[in-house]
Amino acid sequence: MIELRNLTRHYGEVTAVNDVSLTVQTGQIAVLVGTSGSGKTTLLRLINRLVQPSSGQVLIDGADTASLPVHHLRRRIGYAIQGDGLFPHRTVARNIATVPRLLGWPKSRIDARIDELLALFQLEPAAFRDRMPHQLSGGQAQRVGVARALAAKPDLLLMDEPFGALDSVIRAKAQSDLRDIQRQLGTTIILVTHDIQEAVQLGDRIAVMDRGRVLQYDSPAQILTQPATPFVRDLIGPTERAFRLLSLTGIGPITMPGEAHGTPIARDATLRDALAECLWSGRDALPVQGGGIVTLDALRANAAQDRQ
Amino acid sequence: MIGRLLLALAAAFALAFLLSPTSFAVLFQPLTRNGAPAIYTQASLLRLTLFHLGIVALAVLISTAVALALALFVTRPVGREFLPLARTITTIGQTFPPVAVLALAVPVMGFGTGPTLVALILYGLLPVFENALAALTGQPAKVAEAARGMGLTPAQRLWQVDLPLALPLLLAGMRLTAVISLGTATIGSTVAAKTLGEVIIAGLLSSNTAYVVQGGMIVGIIAVLIHAGFQHLERRAARATGQTD
């Protein structure tokens, strides 16, 4: 469990982060979202002390991190940034090995870990181990960057706009892969983004920040249906809200018995996928793979329920 | 490819000439007057060349060590305010004429190799310092940020990230210093340092153009070879550090 208690950071007259307290449960993804200059990146960097807090505490599993030498703290916390930040003079394997080597892991354990992570990120170990960073595509470099951040099995992974440099097709894939890997490893993640869609897709909890303060820290559904302030509502984008909400829920709960025509929809599709398919193919009902149907009426009823 | 061939030919020619200078007498005969000797024989040209190279190598190593240490110091938080001072020192080292350095150093150090070494070291500081400074301050911000964020200590960042990435530019600085020093070292012979300058000076004193040309030619060919050698190393270092052009 990660606890931020009354974290504050001043730069002269400016208060970049103003009295922020929030708790991230072990194994959850918390997303810090806000416009540029909202203090989200500074807040992230306060956690691994790339920026020293003016006041306040960071607790990992109840222990105050201020008592640790800063480089020891950082070796326990994974850090992945936009545009990967890979060491250009080191192979993929050496990049991933960075923190394990600092921690003095035996070579056999490091090698095994490298191969395990490469496989996890769908990079064939034999082909990628000895490549140099400039021989990787943007998406591959980004995956290696995250693999490197996860190498020493950190208590916490901090990600600063990790997908910001990727084009939209690769980004969507990278996001869903991250979600899968996080589920698999149970890593606690705090991720910074300016993209509310990314926040809704990835976050168990979303913290909306503006001018150094956290305006609302809640589940995506709560943020979408009950924005705490006008700023939060504007950030969500009122016209997009319905679709974002639909993308949060799978079709499972509204699947009912019945028969329908046409191409079936996947069992793990979201309500948004189902709506899009209905509109696009001009159908009122869709068959679901493996049995059952989803109807336009059910989608509408579900949305009405969310509104209340 | 043609460049390499020319370099190899130049190297072969210089080597042959140094091993047996008198075989090339016919080449230099037209440059002499009144039956003066065409080839300098008061000392072995090979020995002079080796001395010359030794002085230059030592000077380049010391300049590099001093300039790199200076660049490292002024790029650390403690030394940042000394940057203008360091710049001034290295610039003065470059602008102060080496001949004047010799003149000032001889009364203190006596005749011989010492004053020449001092003049070359001062003269060679600037290229290495400026290149090292550019290399250390011009590194990608993301890489430095990642290194810090992963928990490398300042010393580890220096040895594992900053210096390896600075290597290609540092080598370029050493190349400039080496080439400058090769030419400048010749004036050391005015204060009795054993360099190829001895041949040139002997030629000037006796109005024997052949001596001047053979001394200058050897220095010139070696300078070109060293230049090419360093460039080769720079390219390799750039490839190894992923900074391919």
Image: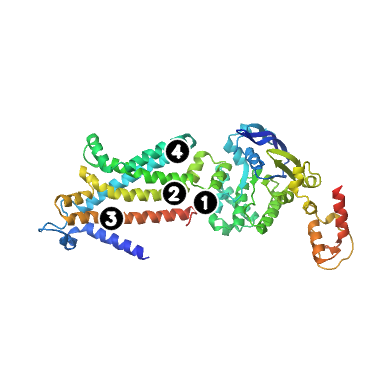
Q: CA distance from mark 1 to mark 2?
A: 14 Å
Give the image quarter of residue B125: top left
Near mark 3 (Cα within 10 A), the count class, few <14, some 14-19 or many ≥20, is some
Chain letter behind tag 3 = B
Give the residue displayed 85% in from the left and 53% down from the top. A303
User: Which mark is drawn over residue A90?
Assistant: 1
Residue B88 in view, yes or no: yes
Residue A96 placement, left or right of B200: right
Give the residue displayed 22% in from the left and 37% down from the top. B110
Near mark 4 (Cα within 10 A), the count class, few <14, some 14-19 or many ≥20, is many
**Relative vertical location of residue B144 with respect to residue B2 in this rendering, above or below:** above
Give the residue displayed 81% in from the left and 47% down from the top. A225
Q: CA distance from mark 3 to mark 1?
A: 38 Å
**Relative vertical location of residue B164 with respect to residue A72 in this rendering, above or below:** below
Tell which tag, 3 or 2, sits nearer the viewer: 3
Chain letter behind tag 4 = B
- Going from N to C along the chain, the mark reached first, 4 or 2, is 4
- Going from N to C along the chain, the mark reached first, 4 or 3, is 4
User: Which mark is drawn over residue B167?
Assistant: 2
Determine contact: label 1, label 4, CB under 8 Å.
no
Q: CA distance from mark 4 to mark 3?
A: 35 Å
> What residue type is disc 4 on?
Val
**Relative vertical location of residue B16 with respect to residue A230 in this rendering, above or below:** below
Tell which tag, 1 or 4, sits nearer the viewer: 4
> What residue type is disc 2 on?
Leu
Q: CA distance from mark 1 to mark 4?
A: 27 Å
Tags 1 and 2 both on a single chain:
no
Q: Nearer the viewer, residue A264 or A229?
A: A229
Instruction: Where is residue A241? Give x, y as percent.
Output: 78, 51
Chain letter behind tag 2 = B
Give the residue displayed 81% in from the left and 44% down from the top. A226
What is the secondary structure assignment of the residue under circle 3? helix
